[in-house]
Image (cartoon, helix red, strand yellow):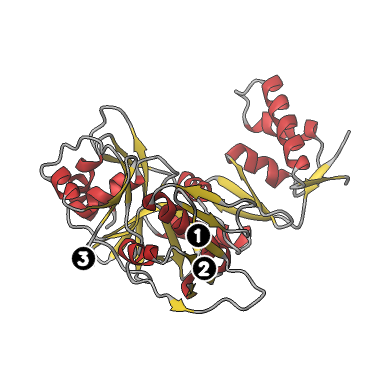
Amino acid sequence: MDLAFPEFGASVRFEGTESLIGELARLTYGWHRETAPVAAGSSADICVARTNGGFRIATPELWPEPEEYDNICDILAAFLADLIALGLARRTDWQTLHATGVEYGGGLLVFPARGRSGKTTLAVYFAACGWRVFADDVLPLVEGGRRGFGIGVMPRVRLPLAPASAPGARQWIDRRLGLANEACAYLALSGDELAPFGTTAPVVAVLVPARRKNASPVLEPLSRSEALRHLLREKMTSPAPAVQTLEIFGHLVETVPCYRLVYEDASMVPAMLRESLPVAIS
Amino acid sequence: MTRYRQNPAIAAKRVDDDLFLVNPENDDIYFLNAIGAGVWNLLALPSTADELAATLAAAFPDMARDRLEADVARLVSDMAGRALILTGG
């Protein structure tokens, strides 16, 4: 079956893997897909096929060789990563960050950070405290960097989960564990907990996470220059020229408050921010 | 002595006291702290590394001169290698 994902400008062929489409729908929120046969003589941007032991994904535009996976969780994670990467290269209206995005009072808090830094853990504990998540890893900015854009992908946590001090937080997560393997699990969040694809909100603060041993959560001052360097480090692929990226991120740090978020236990961060933010971003 | 000057194709954005330079040829973004930004500003007029170090030494008399000269030499070499600055007057 051939599908088009118009928001990412990509075509996908599922060869004997049509059952993955239903699973994919449970990992995304607000996505559109259309049946769109790839023209004869052409190949799909992504092909997901069966192998004897599992699955194979081929994305020639990104990788010279196909990759193979032996479980549904990993093949769908690879598929989502490739599809999003294609979208990033094609969406001229996106300036995208490695970042967590969380809604706060109708605005968006942006937490730029690289992989394996605890972004997803932060996002999940915000959701557990009733804050709607826009992104746990990939956060496009639109409208000149003024607004964040939710891409509607369920957070994927690494297992085992770290201990949490906040009462009830772990139980909240355990109740939402979805598709999983021994290393990671997607959460099954509701529409109140994850913003659907295309939802936008104005960025109201940039909070650069800094995990420190034995640190109670606190917001520390961060210069605009340092905030900009963090944003530039976490910039993802974009067809936009660097001059435009610098203007957009530069404007962002000049117009919203920027802080360093120091913490050790992510589950304690939402309560601290609930207390601190009204002053910090006023 | 080699004289250096700003590459006029470079875009610059100041944030706080720091400077971010972009080379549109390769989309590299280069960060300069306040002193580096001072060097960039001085290179609006063609200057040698020695002239730059002398100007900075006058502005920062507490800094060791040999350290200053080494830092300036390293900076202009790096910036020239990235085509942020050009040689020749």
User: Which residue is located at x 43 percent, y 53 percent?
Assistant: A75
Which residue is tagged 2? Answer: A13
Residue B20 position (above or below residue A20): above
What's the chain of the residue with tag 1?
Answer: A
Marks 1 and 2 close (CB-CB < 8 Å): yes
| Structural crowding at the residue carrying mark 2, measured as other residues with C-alpha within 10 Å and reported as few (<14), some (14–19) or many (≥20) | many
Q: How many marks?
A: 3
What's the chain of the residue with tag 3?
Answer: A
Q: Is residue A217 left or right of residue A19?
A: left
| Structural crowding at the residue carrying mark 1, measured as other residues with C-alpha within 10 Å and reported as few (<14), some (14–19) or many (≥20) | some
What's the chain of the residue with tag 2?
Answer: A
Q: Earlier in the sequence, mark 1 or mark 2?
A: 2
Which residue is tagged 3? Answer: A192
Q: Is residue B56 left or right of residue A160?
A: right
Q: Earlier in the sequence, mark 1 or mark 3?
A: 1
Q: Callout 3, which amino acid?
A: Asp
Which residue is tagged 1? Answer: A49
Q: Callout 2, which amino acid?
A: Arg
Q: Secondary structure at mark 2?
A: strand
1 or 2: mark nearer the eye? 1
Marks 3 and 2 close (CB-CB < 8 Å): no
**Which quarter of the image is occupied by the N terminus of chain B?**
top right
